[in-house]
Image: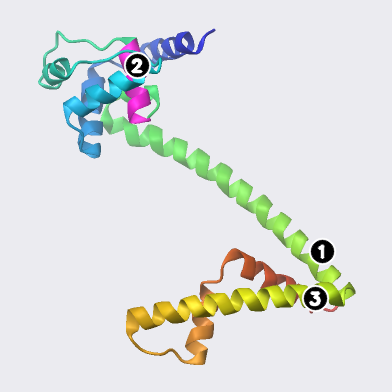
Amino acid sequence: MAKSEDDRWVVAQVINEVGSEKYVVERIRAEVKARGWSLGELSRRMNKSSLEGNGGVIDRTVLSKMLGGDRGRHVSIDQLITLSKVFGIPLGELLVPASTLANIRGWRYVMEASEIQNEIRHLRTDYKERVIDVGRMLRESPELLGRVREYGDALRAKEMGMHLDQWRHDRGTEPTEEELAAGVHENRPPALVTVDDALEEGERNE
């Protein structure tokens, strides 16, 4: 099935199962207002999208009549596809009342966040295992230990310089050594965090 045909099939299924065309006007009104677009701007974007092969166009005058409550104006499936592309939202969200949108979108975000959290958990495990490996290598190789320390010192010096400049700009004073060190530690870039973790691991007794 071609992509355009697949899009039309999806729209038809959504309309049949959960949606209604009457909510489209409500969604158009909300999305245009949220973006600060005029009806002319929306029509222009739809025309550009249709030229790229995505769906149909709604003229500015027709849009105005639709939003004004003209029930004789209907939105075609091609136009729904274009609206979805222009707004960057799923087709199904154009076909449900705004009152249920948070339920649909919120549940999707919960599922997406759960997947991200799972990825974070695996990444933390991978990171910890890699740091342990580096720590063992640091104990075995004085050359590597010196190299990592030199790299860490260079990173820390750079961060101290940046933090000092920022402190002077924001407060017009000089920080104490303790304040400077604390600020750098709190805002360490990932590379410096990794160096510090690896060096700490390298100092552990097996």
Start-end of magenta stretch: 78-88
Left or right, residue 206 beside residue 92: right
Q: Secondary structure at mark 3?
A: helix
Residue shown at 73% from the left, 70% from the top = 198
Which residue position is annotated with label 1?
133
Identify residue type, mark 3: Leu
- The percent coordinates of residue 191 (x first, y second) are 63, 66
Residue shown at 25% from the left, 38% from the top = 35
Q: Secondary structure at mark 1?
A: helix
Residue 169 counted in the magenta span: no
- The percent coordinates of residue 88 (x first, y second) are 37, 30
Left or right, residue 180 beside residue 199: left
**Foreground: 18 or 23?**
23
* SS majority, magenta: helix
Which residue position is annotated with label 3?
145
Residue 50 bears which disc, if any?
2
